[in-house]
Amino acid sequence: MSLTETLPVPALAAPAATPRLAQALAGLRSRVWRGALALILPLAVLALWHAATLNGWVAQQILPAPALVWTTLLDLWHSGELWTNLAISLTRVAWGFSAALVIGLALGVAMGLSKTAEAYLYPSFKAISEVPVLGWIPLLIMLVGIGEAMKILVIAKAAAVPITINTQQGIRNIPQPYLEVARVYRFNPRQLWLKVIFPSTLPSLFNGFRYGLTNAWLSLVTVELLASSEGIGYQMVWGRQLFQLDVVMACMLVIGLVGLAIDLFLQITETRLLRWRRAAF
Amino acid sequence: MTYPIPETDPVLVRDEVPSDKHVQPPALWRWLSQRDWRGFALPLAVLALWWAVTRFGLANTQVLAPPEAVLVEGLHQIFNGGFVWDLLASVSRDLAGFTLGGLAGFALGTLLGTSRLAELLVAPSFNAVKQIALFAWIPMISVWFGMGEPAKVVFIALAAFYPVAINTFEGIRSVNRDYAEVARVYGFGRLQLWRRVILPAASPQIFTGLHLALIYAWLATIGAEYFLKSGYGVGNSMIDGREHFNMGSVLFGLVVVGSIGALLNQFAVRLEHRALKWRNRAA
Amino acid sequence: MSTLSLNHVGKQYSVKGEQLDVLDDINLHIQPGEFVAIVGSSGCGKSTLLRLVIGLDDDYRGQIRIDGEKISGTSLDRGIVFQEHRLFPWLTVEQNVGLALENSPLSNDEKKRTIAGHLDLVGLKGFETAYPYQLSGGMSQRVAIARGLVNRPGVLLLDEPFGALDALTRANLQAELRRIWEQEGITMILVTHDVEEATFLADRIVVLQPRPGRIKRVVPVPLPHPRNRADPAFVAIKDDVLSEFGHAPRPQLIEPLPRPFGDYVFAW
Ligand SMILES: Nc1ncnc2c1ncn2[C@@H]1O[C@H](COP(=O)(O)OP(=O)(O)O)[C@@H](O)[C@H]1O
Ligand SMILES: [Mg+2]
């Protein structure tokens, strides 16, 4: 049964030196092995892609050669075009996300702490969040035009929803026993916030932050594809309109890399944060 | 000093049912008085402001249509316009893409979950490709599949594919090996092991994947209709509405998009609840 | 009926590259229809031993034979009740018991009847369609016992099956198990750390010592059934086994009879 199947890693070398050394060696070997296995598929795809374009199996208009995509990427990089567009895009994300942080934290804290605030605000919040960003775009274009404000609003909406929800739930779900401990030791409000409320809502806050940032990036790409005259998404649309598919694919690569960078950033922040949290308790 | 938290205990709030067993007021009255109407204050205020702004000429009614005009347009859309066809077209392509992507995702997730070798070969590439924002595929898809129905369905399928593949994979991989041992003790064959152990054990997470896929597919449906502007669809009607400065049409579309999304979500929640009733949801 | 024999059985686990001896040189010959109890402190390898005998783990030294034939893999003729009940949470009580009959030649009607009979036997009539999350720990364990018995294996291994039960249910089920054993002639190997339970049920008690798990002593229980827990001979055997753990009651306080220590020592 393949469930219990183990990977075909070379078996542990016979009576190796010390167990620890053998273990380290085995770990290294399995990592190299894994890396090699992981590369097989991408290399095969690349080879096939290359062969297909070289032998004219598919037209250049449909699939540009991988080498062309690569040189285009380098060109865009060196000419600075890529950087300008990427900078514009990232600035939009930064503005939108910052706005979302302010709005989301304020709303979340208000609705988390006060039942009254929740009663007044939550239904509207729910209604707004229930309609995806895509649904709001045409309306926002009509109301505020196609400019920067619309893009930042779109990004802010996409990011604010998870931030609000997670903040509210984080505050709601502070374990009662911790609050009782604080009461027993007669913490003042500052201590209460610093030692109890903030640390125990932190994981939830971080979750909101994570989904917020991911959403912000995804909706940036969408809104730039749909209605923009600058930015990485626009560059892609532009490439598509001129049938310069090498530009389109180079942009996809860049978008993927930024996505990866955001992911890594979030992972590193999380481990940092968790360490900090452990220290706080 | 006060502690704001206790008053917000949701359990306490939910249990506050008035015990008026003896004097029963009319059902309608009870329903009305038990509802929390405070949530309507904000929307009503916005509505009033909107109405006032358009009524007293503070805004260009070319840009901001008055609320009553929007209502009329919405009604017109429902009864005379092609709304039904738009909705039908959107929902059917949504379901087509969802089915296609769901099946493909399930197949890949199963492969990665059962074969360690397949996992090592494919999972890293899959995770890398996953980093490309979904909508960034649209330009290439439009080159490869045109601007018509196939391109839209492919895009929707791609949106549904990722969550199903990931969750199926993780669900299968995290099946408790103890259960597989029970199956071995009773001499289960491969197929029995699948049907009786692995699938049911992984089903909660597979359902999570399908649930997410349903939501993403609907998003992708609207997106596909925005970008690949041929044929009918709720998204098409919204884009048309914007181009013709028809706010009623845009707002109506917005409400429809939200409602269908909410409906699909509810459907998934109900289904999940029924199919997974063996899980102790209360605890 | 089958004779089970273990010859020089040993087992190592490799933990972080280091070999850890869990079982060493286990020799045991169990006659058809015999009831053997294995007692030992926690972590001394009792569950490991059962995993080897059931055939879930074939990475061991020595031989395990049934009727002279080396076991390979699991078999429907060897059943087990796991220490953790291992009910499938997605199946109802009767479906869980039915798992054991999945590959049996019985007709569906017969299966239904057997399942109902066994649920009755463990006192779970009326809970047929309950899901595991709705059961208490003791009830789950009883379902697991029903599942272990329902296909009438020639050898049944029980890994601390009554550990999670309250005293009353435990006594009831012990009596039931005894009755089933007498009726069906199943060979039973019961792992327990309740010495009284072992003395009440077993023909022989195998005492394991830890690190590595070895047989320290085998104590026969030559008492007729039904056994009386207050019977001085019963108490004497129980205390004898207990003394292996250093838990024996001090003689001058409780011991009413002179206890000829050597009489029950038949270690081999
Ligand atoms: N899969 C395993 N890998 C490594 N060590 C194990 C494994 N299973 C059990 N052990 C170790 O073997 C010893 C015996 O375990 P077990 O047979 O479960 O004991 P018992 O059932 O007598 O309490 C314990 O020290 C345990 O930590
Ligand atoms: Mg054990």
Image (cartoon, rainbow, N blue to C red):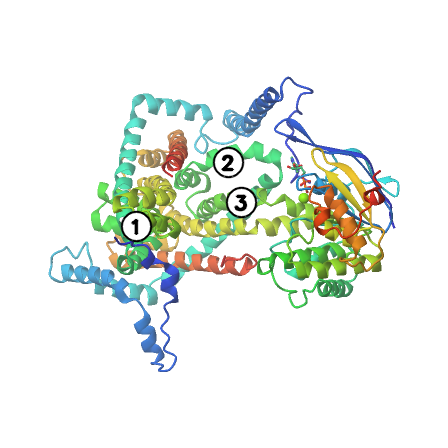
How far is the residue under mark 2 from the one under mark 1? Answer: 35 Å
The secondary element bearing badge 3 is classed as helix
Which of A132/A167 is in front? Answer: A167
**Chain letter belonging to callout 2:** B
- Is residue B251 visible in the rendered image? The answer is yes
Q: Residue furthest front?
A: C252
Residue A260 pos. (x, y %)? 41, 33
Residue A99 pos. (x, y %)? 25, 43
Image-quadrant location for residue A82 = top left
Task: Using a 10 Å C-alpha cutoff, classify the residue at mark 3 as few (fewer than 14 neighbours), some (14 to 19) or many (20 or more).
Answer: many
Q: Residue furthest bottom?
A: B23
Image-quadrant location for residue B252 = bottom left
Lateral position of residue B116 relative to residue C76, left or right: left
Q: Which residue is mark 1?
A: A108
The secondary element bearing badge 2 is classed as helix
Q: Which residue is mark 2?
A: B126
Query: Which of the four quarters of the rendered structure image does ligand 2 lie in?
Result: top right
- Mark nearest the camera among 3 and 1 is 1
Q: Residue furthest top?
A: A17
Lateral position of residue A230 relative to residue A172, left or right: left
Lateral position of residue B47 relative to residue A41, left or right: left
Q: In the image, is residue B37 above or below residue B182?
A: below
**Chain letter belonging to callout 1:** A
Q: Which residue is mark 3?
A: B105
Q: Amino acid at mark 3?
A: Gly
How far is the residue under mark 3 from the one under mark 1? Answer: 35 Å
- Mark nearest the camera among 2 and 1 is 1
Task: Using a 10 Å C-alpha cutoff, classify the residue at mark 2 as few (fewer than 14 neighbours), some (14 to 19) or many (20 or more).
Answer: some
Q: Are marks 2 and 3 on the same chain?
A: yes
Task: Give the residue drawn at x 59%, y 25%.
Answer: A30
Task: Using a 10 Å C-alpha cutoff, classify the residue at mark 1 as few (fewer than 14 neighbours), some (14 to 19) or many (20 or more).
Answer: many
